[in-house]
Structure formats: structure tokens, C-alpha cells
Amino acid sequence: MHPGDKLFLEQRVHDALRSCFDPEIPVNVYDLGLIYDVAVTDDAGVVIRMTLTARDCPAAGSLPGDVERAVAAVEGVSGVRVELVWDPPWHPSRISEPARHQLGLVD
């Protein structure tokens, strides 16, 4: 895979991640800061490191699967692996500026 193709695919993966929402918070997982890393391999596989807002998050059973399905549906992706990590712990400071406004966290 050429570097330009890899970048294009990564952008489409980011767009797909923005279609996944935490069911308790009206913000997508990308802007909520739950996605720690997205890596596209040379064979168009995607590895995603993500977390949840808390270890006991009710979405723990569904959100990683939702992320995997959304990314797997991106044309050109050959496979997806979602790694759920807890270090570093999620913190509200990871929320994007637009999402902060959406949630009313910024004046």
C-alpha cells in the first residue's frame, strides 16, 4: 500500500469512527477522546486502541464491537482489531473542542 493510499484509508477510518456514539453521551467516540490510536497496516488492516469513560461503563459490552463493525465496513479495509486499553485512563480533557461546545462544557 502506498503512503498516500494509507493516509486516505486512515481518514476514512476516522470518519467511520465519528459514526459511533457512546449511548449515554451524545458525542461520537472519536471526539469524545475514546480513540487513543489508529494504525493502518501495509495490507490495509486497521488496529484501534481505545478506552471507555470508565471501567464499569455500561457500553463496555457493545461499544468496541460497534467500532469494529463501523471500521470493517470502510471500503478497502482488510480487517480490524480493536484493543480496549485502560492506560492512560480516559479524562474529560480528551474531549475535542467542538464536542465540548456540544456538551455545554465551554462558555
Image (spheres, rainbow, N blue to C red):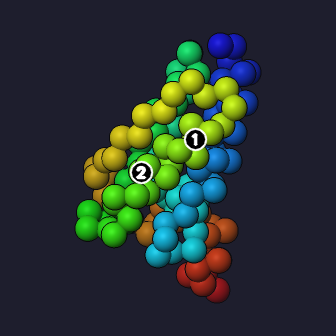
Q: Is residue 37 visible?
A: no
Q: Secondary structure at mark 2?
A: helix
| Residue type pointed to by label 1 | Val
Q: Give whichever of 38, 45 is nearer the camera.
A: 45
User: Would you place residue 97 above or below residue 81 in this image?
Assistant: below
Q: Quadrant of the C terminus?
A: bottom right
User: Would you place residue 15 above or below residue 75 in this image?
Assistant: below
* Residue 100 percent across, percent down from the top left: 59, 74
* Marks 2 and 1 in Cβ contact (< 8 Å): no
Residue found 34% across the figure and 58% down from its top: 61
Mark 2 or mark 1, earlier in chain: 2
* Residue 75 percent across, percent down from the top left: 69, 32
| Residue type pointed to by label 2 | Pro
Residue at image mark 2:
64
Q: Determine the image quadrant of residue 99.
A: bottom right
Residue at image mark 1:
71
Measured Cα–Cα span from mark 2 to mark 1: 11 Å
Q: Secondary structure at mark 1?
A: helix
* Residue 49 percent across, percent down from the top left: 41, 42
Q: Is residue 19 left or right of residue 60?
A: right
Q: Is residue 12 left or right of residue 38?
A: right
Residue found 68% across the figure and 47% down from its top: 15
